[in-house]
Structure formats: structure tokens, C-alpha cells
Image (tube, helix red, strand yellow):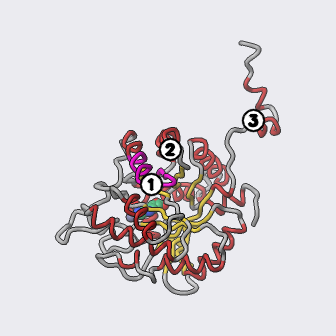
Amino acid sequence: MFPNHRPRRLRSTPALRRLVRETVLRPQDLVYPLFLVPGQGIAQEVRSMPGVYQLSIDKAVEQCRKVQDLGLGGVILFGVPDDKDLAATGAWHDHGIVQQGTQAIKQALPELLVMADTCLCEYTSHGHCGVLAEADTTGRVLNDPTLTLLQKTAVAQAESGADIIAPSGMMDGMVQAIRQGLDAAGFTETPILSYAAKYASAYYGPFRDAAESAPQFGDRRTYQMDPANGSEALKEIALDELEGADMLMVKPALAYLDILWRVKEATQLPVACYNVSGEYSLVKAAARNGWVNEEAIVLETLTSMRRAGADFILTYHAKDAARWLGHGG
Ligand code: PBG
Ligand code: ZN
């Protein structure tokens, strides 16, 4: 043994370990997703996501108050409308559920950061993230007609007070189209957080229960990325940067920490990751069986995402994690 080299020296007390700790996890690094439904007084638990609820706007505002008291980074809003159609009207209409929710939340809590997820899949009758040709039964989304609707959606979200626009549809040119739309409408200061490297993942299963957005036919593999590809993620982020993205996201997170690391190394922009529904449900199921220690597993997992390069994390564990970290609430 080399007597000068004893790494255990720095592990010998909690104070030493804290002094040399490389990664910190703080409540402000976490963003909490919310699912908005029409109506009043509704808090309907999602079957496959214990502790996650579809909320009417009044209940969502209550949740946002807790989010603010816990010191979280903000919320991201998803809409679950009553009516879906081929043109995804609910996504871009002034009275769309996310637009209404954003207005109510910003009115009650002007300081809370509100991100709007910008996609069409929750609003189309077929559940795809964009426009389909009339006879299509495979889900081969038409790229450019979709851009027009994403642009309209982003502008409507900004008009309702959204602080950050977060396009998640993986259409080519979506960041540029949205940037142009926002600028033309006078929202030159509204940042875009692009879901730049989003994979066609089985980990989204429970989300599709929560958002009622499963595709009615086909799948998302003609627009979301192949899980086998890594270099392609770097191409996607390079394009989104050129198109004017302000921040980049990798999604899912846990099975893609290598991608997160490569993206962080390749960009100067802030990088986020999405700790998605399936990742949450796996932990919840095991914890409910008493097979893992939920608090320890969640904090270790979120810390690993920060270590791999995430500046902030979208996660359904956000409120619990903030409590476990011992801040606020
Ligand atoms: C919609 C969207 C999805 C998620 C976020 N935005 C699902 C999908 O692509 O089907 C997944 C989030 C999660 O699983 O928690 N474009
Ligand atoms: Zn979508």
C-alpha cells in the first residue's frame, strides 16, 4: 500500500464527507409536474402513479402554494382536456386548460415559475404529438403543418403568463418556429426549454394514464429517438441550439445518464433532465412493498442526475424530496 494514498481519510466523519461533497441537491433544482383537468374541486389520483393527481385549476393553485413554500424551482403544466380533435384545438385556444391554469396560478402566485409543456398529444383525438394526413393509420406525423400549431400553442401559453415554453414533440425545426412565433408576438424575453433529446421510451407508460394521451394507433418512433442512439442526441442538441433554444432537456433520465453527461459536456446552455413517470412508478411500487427505502432511493437517484450533469430536474418526487432535504413546508 502507498501510505500517502488513503482515500478513506476523507470519509471518516460526517463533517469531512460534507466538506468534500461534490454534488448538491437543493429544492430549487426540482420542478414539479401538474396535470390539469376541467372542473372544480377535483383531485383524482392517477392509478399507476400513487401520490400524483389530476387536478382542477383551483386544486392546482393550492398545490402551487405548497410548491412555493417548499422552495421548489417551479411547476410544469400538462393539460387533460374534455374534448380532443384532429386540430388539437385545446392546445392553442385562448381558453385551453393550460392557458386558464397558467393565468390562475400566476395571478395567485406571481413569483412562482410556471413552465408550459408545448405539445399536441394531450389534445389530438388520435393521441399523436402532431398533425396526421387524413388517411393515416400509422402515426406518421406531418412535420411542417405541426410546426404552425406548436407556434400558436406557444404564443397562447406566453399570452396567458407562462414563464418558460417547453416544446416536447420532437418535430424538426420546432424550436425555430416557436422562437419566431414568440418574437413576432412580442415575447422576445420568454425562454425556450427544448426537450432536445427525447427518446421513444416505455418509461412514459404511466404518464399516458395521467395525461390520457396514449396514441390510439401506431407509436411515436417516427419522431422520438431510438433508445439505442447516443451521437444522435448530440446532433439534436446542436440543432436546437442553432434554432435558439435557451435550455436543453434529456428525457427520460435514469436510463440515459450517459446521454445527460455527453450533452452537458457538449453545450454551454443549462441542461435539464426529466425523471419520468415510469421511473417514479417503479420506485413507488417497490417502496410500497417495503423492498426499498423510498427516501434514500429517491435522494440518491436525483443526486446521480445532478452528478451526471443536470442543472435541474423535472420530477414527480419534487415535493417529497424537498421535505426530505429539510427545507420549508
Ligand atoms: C408529451 C409528453 C410525454 C411526456 C412528457 N411530455 C409523453 C409521451 O411522449 O408520450 C412524458 C412524461 C413522463 O413520462 O413523465 N409529448
Ligand atoms: Zn406529445
Say which residue label 1 marks: 244
Q: Position of residue 290 (x, y in %)?
A: 62, 55
| SS at mark 2 in the image | helix
Q: Tell whether position 237 is magenta.
A: yes
Task: Give the left or right position of residue 314, taking residue 146 as reference.
Answer: right
Please name which of the two marks, 1 or 2, marks the residue nearer to the observer. 1
Q: Mark 3 near ligand 1 (CB under 8 Å)?
A: no
- Location of the C terminus (image quadrant): bottom right
Q: Position of residue 93 (x, y in %)?
A: 41, 80
| Closer to us: 264 or 44 | 264
Say which residue label 2 marks: 260
Q: Position of residue 176 (x, y in %)?
A: 39, 58
Query: Visible in this render: residue 199?
Result: yes
Sooner in the amino-acid sequence: mark 3 or mark 2: 3
Please name the amino acid that badge 3 sits on: Val
**Outermost residue, bottom direction?**
40
| Closer to us: 111 or 285 | 111
Please name the amino acid that badge 2 sits on: Leu
Say which residue label 3 marks: 20
Please name the amino acid that badge 1 sits on: Gly
| Closer to us: 19 or 317 | 19
Residue span colored magenta: 236-250
Sooner in the amino-acid sequence: mark 1 or mark 2: 1
Which picture quadrant has residue 71? Answer: bottom right
| Closer to us: 35 or 92 | 92
